[in-house]
């Protein structure tokens, strides 16, 4: 019929629409495969799906209009066949805005709206997955060439990361699971929550801004997470904006993105990649538990070392006390011998003086018997004077002896080690018990024990200084 239409024939709009349908059926009797990006997808209550299949310029700015667009409709009956195809591929893709697809459809002219549309009847999941994989590998190559892949992994984790920034959709199961793990740990976590969409065309920019906001909140660690989904659901985490945000983040980033076996670009650039949001929260809890375990171990080591040091110090103190007691006993014995000698000398001096005085008295008495009265009086006078001098000399000798004894007693007291220590002095010995009298008696690294009036100190020699030196030996 269409071939019979002449140039001057007048058609109604409906007739022209029918002619266009015939022409499209003749040109594409088996339909056509078309590749493009899904945009403005709508799922109607009737079960039908509507979207635009668009082509964008490779150099187009974000938000720029497409260079070409085609209306697509996926009727409910055709959708069941398409979903069955996707299911056979493991439900790895989901039709959503921004997803690159290769679809088969029948071209049709929709008369009511006067527009050309493609009635979708099939999909090629391999095309979508291949495009995602190619984009992912290209971005990874760029980041690797820049040395940016492990930049965040090089950041130092806080020993006790109790301030945690969570970046996810706050109404999701992933958010609830992470809070359950953190609060159930019993640790005093302070959680900073940053809400963000985790899929869709606008998700990459939103996620990047959320990571930056969490880092600006001075958290110890940022946890970027979302629950499980298809490969296309997770495409936002392969986006360059998200990767760049993680690379430039000044805080360690933990990721817990879905249940996919393939790692996203976000996982590759993060400090630590976990398989799920729950695993990411558990990893943070484990850091705190590890720190507490190390703290307990350090405490036990300190206790063991302290007991060992105290036992050694007690042994050294006992040995020093015994040495001091032996020294004091020896000094006391020397003082006793000195006192005995002084007393013997005093007795000998007294006996000598008495014998000398007796001889003088006898001599005077004899001369007195040989002389007359006048001589007797002179002798008596001389005898009195001699007796007086003898008395004075005796008292002087006794006082001198007493002072000598007092001086000896004073020296004995000053030799008492306990008295010397109480006066602020100290006694230093090496580990082998030898008394340290000179800096030459020890060497750097030697252990010494310093005895004071109220105890002892263990030390280790770091360096020696002579009386006129100011440099380390």
Image: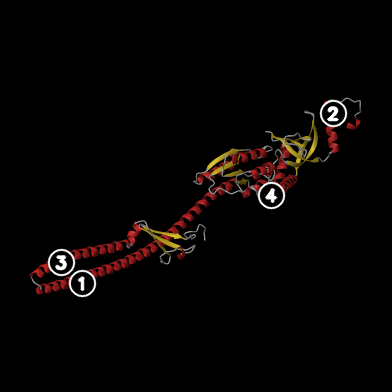
For disc 1, the marked residue is: 352
> Cα distance, mark 2 to mark 1?
165 Å
- Marks 1 and 2: in contact by CB < 8 Å? no
Q: Which mark is residue 387?
A: 3
Q: Is residue 11 left or right of residue 268?
A: right
Residue beneath disc 2: 16
Q: Could you give the CA–CA distance between mark 2 and mark 3, rounded to whole angstroms?
A: 172 Å
Q: Is residue 78 left or right of residue 472?
A: right
Which mark lies nearer to you, 2 or 3? 3
Residue mark closest to the camera, 4 vs 3:
3
Sequence order check: which comes first, mark 4 or mark 1? 4
In the image: residue 430, left or right of residue 13:
left
Q: Which mark is residue 147?
A: 4
Callout 3: helix, strand or loop?
A: helix
Q: Are marks 4 and 1 in contact (CB under 8 Å)?
A: no
Marks 4 & 2, CB-CB < 8 Å contact: no
């Amino acid at each position: 019929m269409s071939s019979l239409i002449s140039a001057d024939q007048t058609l109604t709009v409906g007739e022209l629409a029918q002619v266009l349908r015939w022409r499209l059926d003749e040109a594409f009797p088996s339909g056509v495969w078309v590749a493009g990006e899904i945009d403005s997808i709508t799922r109607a209550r009737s079960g039908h799906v509507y979207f635009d299949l668009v082509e964008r310029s490779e150099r187009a700015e974000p938000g720029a209009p497409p260079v070409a667009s085609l209306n697509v409709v996926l009727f409910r009956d055709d959708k069941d066949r398409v979903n069955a195809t996707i299911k056979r591929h493991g439900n790895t893709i989901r039709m959503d805005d921004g997803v690159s697809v290769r679809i088969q459809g029948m071209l049709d002219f929709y008369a009511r709206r006067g527009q050309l549309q493609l009635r979708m009847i099939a999909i090629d999941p391999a095309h979508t997955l291949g495009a995602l994989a190619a984009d992912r590998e290209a971005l990874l190559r760029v980041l690797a060439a820049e040395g940016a892949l492990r930049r965040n992994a090089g950041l130092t984790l806080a020993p006790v990361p109790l301030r945690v920034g969570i970046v996810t959709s706050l109404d999701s199961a992933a958010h609830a699971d992470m809070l359950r793990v953190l609060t159930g740990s019993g640790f005093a976590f302070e959680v900073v929550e940053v809400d963000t969409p985790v899929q869709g065309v606008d998700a990459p920019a939103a996620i990047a801004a959320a990571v930056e906001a969490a880092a600006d909140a001075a958290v110890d660690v940022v946890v970027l997470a979302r629950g499980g989904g298809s490969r296309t659901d997770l495409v936002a985490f392969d986006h360059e904006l998200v990767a760049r945000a993680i690379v430039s983040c000044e805080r360690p980033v933990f990721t817990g993105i879905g249940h996919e076996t393939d790692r996203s670009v976000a996982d590759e650039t993060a400090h630590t990649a976990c398989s799920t949001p729950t695993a990411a929260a558990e990893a943070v809890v484990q850091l705190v538990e590890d720190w507490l375990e190390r703290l307990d171990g350090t405490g036990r080591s300190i206790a063991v070392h302290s007991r060992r040091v105290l036992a050694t110090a007690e042994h050294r103190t006992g040995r020093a006390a015994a040495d001091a007691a032996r020294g004091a006993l020896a000094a006391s014995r020397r003082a006793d011998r000195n006192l005995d000698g002084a007393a013997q000398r005093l007795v000998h001096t007294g006996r000598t003086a008495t014998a000398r005085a007796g001889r003088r008295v006898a001599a005077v008495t004899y001369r007195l018997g040989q002389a007359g009265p006048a001589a007797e009086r002179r002798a008596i006078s001389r005898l009195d004077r001699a007796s007086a001098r003898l008395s004075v000399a005796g008292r002087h000798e006794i006082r001198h002896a007493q002072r000598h004894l007092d001086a000896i007693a004073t020296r004995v007291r000053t030799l008492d080690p306990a008295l010397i220590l109480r006066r602020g002095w100290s006694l230093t010995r090496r580990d082998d018990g030898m008394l340290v009298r000179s800096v030459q008696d020890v060497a750097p690294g030697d252990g010494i024990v310093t005895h004071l009036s109220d105890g002892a100190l263990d030390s280790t020699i770091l360096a020696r200084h002579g009386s006129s030196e100011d440099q380390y030996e």
